[in-house]
Image: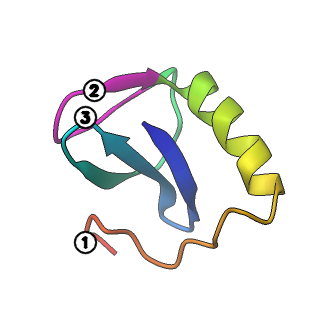
Amino acid sequence: MRIEGKLPEGYVVLCGNGHEEHSFIVQNLNVSVECPRCGTTALSTNLVTKYTPRALSQDVPLVRECACGTI
């Protein structure tokens, strides 16, 4: 699980369970994040720690829409 980007609606989180990847939006990062589709959980601090260096580099594209279809 990882944060893919930030939208006005919240954070776009990508979850991959080894077989497929899916995304969802989290409005607020609480202590942990749970995927509504597969139930995978991750600590928000770990997600942010992985996301911050990527966001500061030029390798992270700006997210314009979410594959979850809610935008």
Q: Is residue 25 magenta?
A: no
**Nearer to us: label 3 or label 1:** 3
First-in-chain label (1 vs 2): 2
**Nearer to us: label 3 or label 2:** 3
User: Marks 3 and 2, how far apart in space?
Assistant: 8 Å
Colour treatment of the image: rainbow
Q: Is residue 41 magenta?
A: yes
Q: Residue at x 17, y 34 (%)?
A: 38
Q: Indicate the quadrant where residue 47 lies.
A: top right
Q: Which mark is residue 40?
A: 2
First-in-chain label (3 vs 2): 3
Q: Which mark is residue 69?
A: 1
Amino acid at the residue labelled 2: Thr
Amino acid at the residue labelled 3: Asn
Q: Position of residue 5 (x, y in %)?
A: 58, 59
**In this rendering, would 46 be left or right of 17?**
right
